[in-house]
Amino acid sequence: MIFGLISGLLFGPPGYYVVLSWCCLSIFIRSLRLKLLSEAAAEGVLVRGAKNQLRMYLTVAVAAAQPLLMYWLTHHLLR
């Protein structure tokens, strides 16, 4: 978020949105990859049980909420 604010101050709103998009995408991919890799290492093979599916949906929901929270917390600082 700090990097996004600095780029927003230096390059204006387009710089802010580019960096925010990049950070949100990387956080989303990293959290899902860590979740999948940790399950594979713990169980040896991915299992499609109800409990694992619930954990995956929760991980996706948190990863999807992070960009919204990042935008909500920083968008007013660049106006």
Image (cartoon, rainbow, N blue to C red):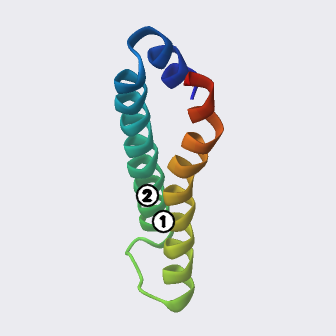
Q: Quadrant of the N terminus?
A: top right
Nearer to us in this view, 72 or 58: 72
**Disc 1 versus disc 2: nearer the observer:** 1
Kind of residue at badge 1: Val
* Distance between mark 1 and mark 2 Cα atoms: 7 Å
Please tell me which residue is depicted at 48% across the width and 82% down the height of the picture.
53
Residue 41, image x, y percentages: 45, 62
The extreme bottom residue here reads: 50
Does residue 75 sit above or below 28 in this rendering?
above
Q: Which residue is mark 1?
A: 60
Q: Secondary structure at mark 2?
A: helix
Kind of residue at badge 2: Leu
Judge from the rendering whether residue 59 lies leftward or rightward of residue 18; answer left or right.
right
Pointer 1 local density, CA inside 10 Å: few below 14, some 14–19, many at least 20 = some
Q: Which label was assigned to residue 32?
A: 2
Please tell me which residue is depicted at 44% across the width and 9% down the height of the picture.
10
